[in-house]
Image (cartoon, coloured by chain):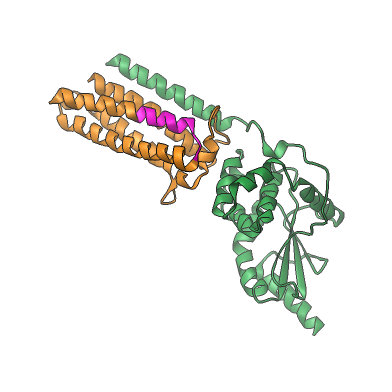
Chain colours: A orange, B green
Amino acid sequence: MRQRQAIALLALVGLFVALYLWLYKIGIIGTLQCGVGACEQVQTSRYADLFGVPVAFYGVVGYAVLLTVALLGLRPRLLAERRVTLALAALATVGVVVSLYLTYLELFVIHAICRWCVGSAVIVTAIWVVALSAVRRSM
Amino acid sequence: MKGFYYLLGVVAIGSGVALWYEAQRPAGTAPAGSPTPVAATDGFRGFTLGSDTARVEVTEYSDLECPFCAQFATVQMPVIREQLIATGRVRWRFRDFPLPGHQYSRYAALVAQCAGEQGRFWEMHDQLFFHHQWAQTGKNPRGLFRSFARDAGLDLAKYDACVDAQRYAGRIQASVEEGTALGVNGTPTFFINGRRYQGRSTSDAFKAAVDSLTKSRK
């Protein structure tokens, strides 16, 4: 239960990070609070869109799905359901792989770092670690 | 369990408020608010489309943030380009006339000029007009314009240097002063062969005006 709560909480924070980047991409938010880093350079690069949709939007959807599954998994009749644990681990694995690829693009192709993207990568990695530990416990 | 949902609610509300605040926050370095260097005109007469030998020249004073200009550019202009400009009958000249009431129109004019420096003024013109939702949000469009610049095929390093230096602010101011001297007080305003055009802003009306001018010269 603790793991699902942690995943829900992390997914909620990740959801807002992705939402922030997406709202910037569609012009609702004017400038990114970036501090050290080059968020605008990353967010306006050609890698910030995939199939005509901002990458941040995929993040919003991904975190929303993780949050929903984690919250559903907290319902009493699903608490012992192993499939929820496996679904969370699978979703988090997809998130980590995508984040790894995006971080690679930042470091070696765009040559700029967006701290919000790094934040999202850290969050999804934390979700992945928690989800894997839940899988191990369920075995 | 109750404590967990309480914590989740606090995080959700806190993050939501922070996002809302960010969306309301005026842009820190609003490009439109930057001081404009006084008209250091380089004799620039505006970007043109069409044949240099066309007998009719239409000069358009336009504001890239103006909704009527956007409507004209997206609805009427494609037909005018096809029927009058591509056929060599008309040369179209674009002059900047950013209206003072529009927060980002001068900045938009600046980025279009910087695109023009790389030979892609009309591509940027189309990006700005065909994705005109930026003019309705009231938010700093700096990042969005950079995306437009990329889509228009610009070298972004050169674009950034040009925009940050406000390289063509003088040209824009000179264009405004020229328009004001000609009596322009709204956008879009058109002149056909130097005479103010008072007709409707439709492709049919322009075609009729051009037809009558070319017939009278035959």
Which residue is at the front of the view, B8 or B208?
B8
Q: What stretch is highlighted in magenta?
A: A111-124
- Quarter of the figure with the C terminus of chain B: bottom right
**The residue positioned farthest toward the bottom in the image shown:** B218
Give the answer, above or below, for where B98 lies relative to B199. Answer: above
Measuring 31% from the left and 14% from the top, which residue is drawn there?
A: B3
Which residue is at the front of the view, A49 or B84?
A49
Type of secondary structure dominating the magenta stretch: helix
Measuring 41% from the left and 19% from the top, which residue is drawn there?
A: B10
Seen in the image, is B82 located left or right of residue B4? Answer: right
| Image location of residue A34, percent across then percent down | 54, 30
Question: Does the magenta segment cover residue B19?
Answer: no
Question: Does the magenta segment cover residue A120?
Answer: yes
Q: How many labels does the image show?
A: 0
Q: In which quarter of the image is residue A64?
A: top left
Give the answer, above or below, for where B87 lies relative to B28. Answer: below
- Quarter of the figure with the N terminus of chain B: top left
| Image location of residue A79, percent across then percent down | 18, 24
Q: In which quarter of the image is residue A14?
A: top left
Give the answer, above or below, for where A15 lies relative to B164. Answer: above
**The residue positioned farthest toward the front in the image shown:** A108
Instruction: Evaluate whether residue A28 shows in this view.
Output: no
Measuring 71% from the left and 76% from the top, which residue is drawn there?
A: B89
**The residue positioned farthest toward the right in the image shown:** B181
Instruction: Evaluate whether residue B217 shows in this view.
Output: yes
| Image location of residue B127, percent across then percent down | 58, 54
| Image location of residue A16, percent across then percent down | 43, 30
Which residue is at the front of the view, A77 or B173?
B173
